[in-house]
Image (cartoon, helix red, strand yellow):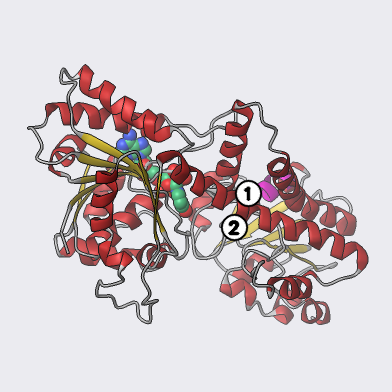
């Protein structure tokens, strides 16, 4: 395989995992971020995000000298064959994707290219951040502008789009064994470089301890820039739709006395539908679905198109967590002074990510109604304290349940799934209400306890 010099900009969930995995498959990687504290931590082996397997992998590739850390982009640009942009693209006030981080990086890349010595090959600038259709061209324009500002308008680069599909909680696995790799570009040469860079992944030829692994070749999908960007938004919008769909069905099931778990099982066995993302519950959250669906809606509106289905997908999702409050009010009546335990805080298991987590929305709504809320999470607890100071956080599941009038299963961590229902009941106060926001527990066993 050809070994590349790779720069990765943005040491968040995506940038960290991407850089560690690219180093692991045999490239020479430098990870850059403007956050000096984060990079100083990484240099001494402290990995700032919780992701199974990531800390060990970062440690290993850093020790082998394959992964280095920096806060200085210019030298990384001049040494790199390929530069990944993995910075955040949060939701702006109007719902659209905020491209200011991506824009800042693009301009700096332009300036750095202008100042560097003449290159043998064009720099391949890879947009891995989730960005709206047309952003590849915008990045190209800003690189050119940055270069012109630095006094050298004839810099050599290619922009390609390479949307990221990793799931937090299994991000390392997803990066090494992806369902597909999607690349978009205006010109063939950038795509050829990316095919060579990803060869060990596409051919599944890199040595790994993570066996057994799928041995079939990974589909390598090449298309134009806008289509690659759209694939990411369409994928996330579809997954969010699937969850909202089953939640709509769950709400009707509850009215007619059907069991949504059994319904989802029966429906999901149809190969055209599939069983994944058919778990009814408190709805979707996290760092991607809410902002990506909002950004796609925003793009549609820009073109005077009303995204009727996406509007409904979001509306159903808003209903889901609010229904939990309604259920509590129906059973406990006034919530003032009532003790409520939130079992799980992260937006899903195996991550410490709390961005757009339903737990925080529920906690805020309960606090507003005068309830006393205690949250438990095995990993995201400390972050939750920082984000929401009025939330009491404990680090023992049963301590959260002690004296609680009601408990809500918010995140189906394994320890929550295997909750000792009898012990929980013995610790709680009447009416000992358990709202299973993830359909993770056996309702009959819970009632019996
Ligand atoms: N988190 C996920 O599961 C996931 C999955 C697929 C795609 N994505 C997309 O990937 C992108 C990154 O997401 P994330 O979750 O890793 O974000 P993050 O917020 O965890 O990390 C972003 C990092 O970028 C750094 N940064 C910001 N501006 C910078 C600049 N000008 N120069 C250098 N560094 C800068 C920040 O300091 C931060 O460390 C987003 O567009 C997101 O939508 C995320």
Helix or strand or loop: what does disc 1 sit on?
helix
Residue at the far front: name it: 188
**Disc number for residue 345:** 2
Image quarter where the C terminus lies is bottom right
Residue at the far right: name it: 256
Q: Nearer the viewer, residue 331 or 192?
A: 192
* Chain-order first, disc 1 or disc 2: 2
- Quarter of the image holding residue 393? bottom right
Residue 183 is covered by the magenta coloring: no
The answer to whether 445 appears left or right of 6 in the picture is: right
Q: Nearer the viewer, residue 7 or 382?
A: 7
Q: Residue at x 58, y 56 (%)?
A: 347
> Picture coordinates of residue 118 (x, y %)?
8, 32
Residue beneath disc 1: 360
Q: Residues within 10 Å of mark 1 (few under 14, many from 20)?
A: many
Tell me where the magenta segment starts and ends, as one range. Answer: 361-365
Find out whether the residues at labels 1 and 2 contact each other: C-beta distance under 8 Å: yes
Does the image show residue 45?
no
């Amino acid at each position: 395989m050809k070994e590349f010099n790779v720069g990765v900009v943005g040491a968040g969930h995506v940038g960290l995992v991407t850089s560690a995995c690219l180093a692991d498959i045999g490239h020479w990687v430098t990870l850059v971020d403007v956050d000096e504290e984060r990079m100083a931590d990484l240099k001494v082996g402290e990995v700032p995000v919780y992701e199974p397997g990531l800390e060990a992998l970062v440690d290993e590739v850093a020790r082998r000298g394959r992964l280095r850390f920096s806060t200085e982009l210019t030298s990384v640009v001049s040494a790199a064959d390929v530069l990944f942009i993995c910075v955040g693209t949060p939701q702006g006030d109007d719902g659209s994707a905020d491209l200011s981080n991506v824009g800042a990086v693009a301009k700096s890349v332009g300036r750095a290219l202008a100042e560097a010595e003449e290159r043998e090959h064009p720099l391949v600038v890879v947009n891995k951040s989730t960005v709206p259709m047309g952003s590849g061209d915008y990045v190209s324009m800003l690189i050119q502008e940055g270069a012109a500002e630095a006094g050298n308008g004839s810099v050599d680069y290619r922009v390609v789009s390479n949307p990221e599909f990793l799931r937090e909680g299994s991000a390392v696995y997803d990066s090494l064994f992806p369902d597909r790799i999607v690349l978009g570009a205006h010109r063939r040469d950038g795509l050829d470089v990316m095919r060579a860079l990803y060869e060990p992944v596409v051919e599944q030829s890199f040595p790994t301890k993570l066996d057994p692994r799928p041995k079939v070749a990974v589909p390598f999908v090449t298309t134009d820039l806008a289509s690659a960007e759209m694939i990411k938004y369409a994928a996330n919008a579809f997954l969010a739709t699937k969850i909202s769909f089953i939640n709509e069905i769950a709400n009707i099931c509850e009215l007619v006395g059907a069991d949504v778990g059994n319904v989802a099982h029966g429906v999901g066995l149809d190969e055209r539908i599939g069983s994944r993302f058919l778990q009814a519950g408190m709805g979707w959250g996290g760092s991607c679905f809410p902002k990506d669906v909002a950004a796609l809606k925003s793009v549609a509106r820009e073109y005077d198109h009303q995204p009727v289905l996406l509007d409904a997908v979001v509306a159903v999702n808003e209903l889901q967590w609010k229904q939990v409050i309604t259920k509590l009010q129906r059973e406990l009546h006034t919530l003032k002074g009532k003790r409520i335990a939130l079992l799980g805080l992260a937006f899903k298991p195996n991550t410490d990510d709390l961005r757009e987590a339903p737990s925080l929305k529920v906690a805020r709504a309960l606090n507003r109604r005068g309830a006393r809320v205690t949250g438990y999470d095995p990993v995201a607890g400390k972050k939750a304290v920082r984000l929401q100071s009025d939330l009491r956080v404990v680090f023992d599941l049963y301590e959260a349940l002690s004296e609680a009038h009601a408990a809500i299963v918010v995140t189906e961590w394994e320890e929550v799934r295997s909750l000792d229902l009898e012990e929980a009941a013995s610790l709680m106060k009447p009416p000992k209400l358990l709202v299973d926001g993830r359909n993770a527990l056996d309702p009959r066993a819970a009632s019996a306890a």
